[in-house]
Amino acid sequence: AQSVTQPDIHITVSEGASLELRCNYSYGATPYLFWYVQSPGQGLQLLLKYFSGDTLVQGIKGFEAEFKRSQSSFNLRKPSVHWSDAAEYFCAVGLGRGGATNKLIFGTGTLLAVQP
Amino acid sequence: ETGVTQSPTHLIKTRGQQVTLRCSSQSGHNTVSWYQQALGQGPQFIFQYYREEENGRGNFPPRFSGLQFPNYSSELNVNALELDDSALYLCASSLGGAGEQFFGPGTRLTVL
């Protein structure tokens, strides 16, 4: 069965430090991969996505992620964290290509706290 | 361009009651997906509607049902509410079933 694992439930980093959030997936084919961010009381905002091609993808707010097929991973990175990055981050796999149902399977999320 | 909107923002119901949640899709989008996000969990796919027909369903019982209207807005109906139905319900719209999904702010449902 398809699944997404985010091993880190809660991470605290200092402002200005680098960040890496881990994501591993289980899926039989090459998946569509996404990272979303959710601030308290808000819906989900798409940070970046991978469909095919270059395995290093750039997103909004200075985030990037690298798809590693051999490790079934899609880790999110940012070189310098800002206090406004404090939020919950979700990795997701999109199922269904060619117009089929694009059901998203989400991980359980990583809550990021930023220390001044 | 208007984004995805949901109503109401918050709702309190008692066990056994029925509830209807509403979603207006982003302009130009013809597909709506619904997700349930329990506290401390990631969102779980309930179902998707494409051009007024159900286009995929997750592992939810039949008391979770939906509709999509000709203007592509959508409703999620839940009958015989249970305590475990307490969650944030998210709606996402897209252009086509495989399109990028844009999420609304959600409806917080509390079942007492």
Image (spheres, coloured by chain):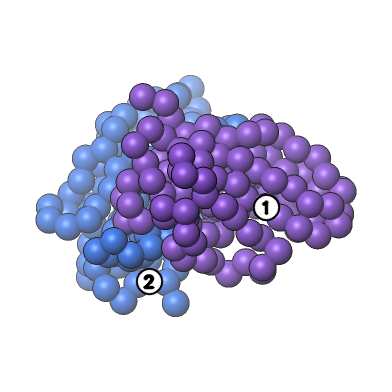
Identify the mark at residue A85; answer none if there is no mark.
none
- Callout 1: SS: strand
- Residue reaching furthest to the left: A53
Residue A105 visible to the viewer: no
Q: Which chain is blue?
A: A
| Quadrant holding the N terminus of chain A | bottom left
The image shows residue A16 at horizontal and vertical percentages of 35, 26
Residue at (29, 33) in percent of width and height = A60
Q: In the displayed structure, does residue A75 sit left or right of residue A9? A: left
Q: In the displayed structure, does residue B108 sit left or right of residue A85? A: right
Chain B representation colour: purple
The image shows residue A67 at horizontal and vertical percentages of 23, 57
Identify the mark at residue A26; answer none if there is no mark.
2
Q: In the displayed structure, does residue A34 sit left or right of residue A83? A: left
Q: In the displayed structure, does residue A20 sit left or right of residue B38? A: left
Label 1 – label 2 distance at C-alpha? 31 Å
Q: Nearer the viewer, residue A112 or A25?
A: A25
Residue at (63, 59) in percent of width and height = B65
Q: Amino acid at mark 2?
A: Ser
